[in-house]
Image: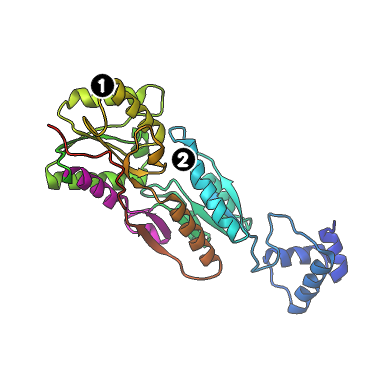
Amino acid sequence: MATISDVARAAGVSISTVSYALSGKRTITASTRARIEDAIRELDYQPHAGARMLAGATTNILALSAPIHTDGHLPTHMRFVTAVVDTARRYDYDVLLLATDDDVSGIRRVAASSLVDGVVAMGVKAHDERVEIVKRAALPAAFIGVSGEHGDGVACVDLDFERAGRLAITTLADAGHRTVGVVGHPPTYLERGTGFVQRFNAGLEAEAAARGIRIDVVSPTLARGDAERAFDDLLDASPEMTAVLFHCNEPVVEAVLRRIRERGLEVPTDLSAFAACASYDTSHLAVPLSSIPLPLDQMCRIAVESALRQVRGVDALGVELIPPVAEDRGSVARPRR
């Protein structure tokens, strides 16, 4: 296997000159660069992954900033990761996973190096520190989620969560429901400023207020038994509740559906149920649920393609919000009382 020393000897230059050609840190003459390029091709030299092959060339690696939090649902998290990797592979790109839970340390490392061509970020906060990091580094980047009110000057793609919140309430209100129990994500999501939860809640609350719908909210964790206890509290506090709206991860939905049966209730005869922004297939649940699906694969594809357009020098900034669509699986009916 050829080394950088072999390339330097073949090109008749010093090792440092080859290094400058690979990193682009210093200007070298066109004739010298041509000799180095010829030597690299003839020797089939493969530079270390941490350096760009030549100034202005690409590494064919994207970083995926995907912080893992203890309150998250790992299978859902990995669906995002897999969707990003699948899209990147179609463009002959590899993906470097940055999974530290502090959001910023991994992205700072890659922004300070030439290891990757661009970044895709998920788990986006309402005001995300990673935005300024990629902007300062002039690093092509796309966010699966929206930072700030209008994306803070980077490329963002997401479901329109505010409209999804409104659509969820509209669906239940149009069916005649006046008191709706909401099973939401754990409170820690809001504590760390998770953007999609804030946006969904804003739409939900605004539409409920406009239509005179009472909403009662519980926010169970993924801990064993917590979802069942939260539903008991919800039903006991609001005996007039005729519908339950899920905006939470799949294990919580499954647990609450079991608890509904244990309490002698049937969906939708006794209690309507609706899943908002579902990252899972609601048709496979014990009770198939009407839902607003989360277009996860579409979001990841758009983000990867946006980052790669920026790598090619094409302006791909701005916010793209995907309109929510409701799917009817028969779990919402008019209340009997």
Which of 140/324 is in front? 324
Disc 1 crowd, CA 10 A, few/some/many (<14, 14-19, 20+): few
Disc on res. 187: none
* Label total for image: 2
In this picture, is 304 found above or below 67? below
Could one spot residue 67 in this view of the protein?
Answer: no
Q: Which amino acid does label 2 sit on?
A: Thr
State the residue at coordinates (74%, 77%): 29
Q: Are marks 1 and 2 in contact (CB under 8 Å)?
A: no
Residue designated by label 2: 76
> x and y percent of residue 281 in the render?
41, 42
Q: As drawn, is 17 to the left or to the right of 120?
A: right
The C terminus - image quarter: top left
Frontmost residue, 298 versus 282: 282
Q: Which quarter of the rendering shows the N terminus? A: bottom right
Residue 85 visible in the shown view = yes
Task: Name the residue located 41 percent from the left edge and 49 percent from the top edge.
Answer: 128
x, y percent for residue 160: 32, 53
Q: Name the residue under label 1.
A: 264
Q: With 24 as the anchor, is 178 left or right in this view? A: left
Q: Is mark 2 on a helix, strand or loop?
A: helix
Quarter of image, res 238: top left
Q: What stretch is highlighted in magenta?
A: 146-173
Residue 37 at x, y percent in the picture = 77, 71
- Compare residues 211 and 146 and report the one nearer the observer: 211
Does the magenta-highlighted stretch encompass residue 165? yes
Where on the picture, by quarter, is residue 218?
top left
Q: Pick whichever of labels 1 and 2 is earlier in the sequence.
A: 2
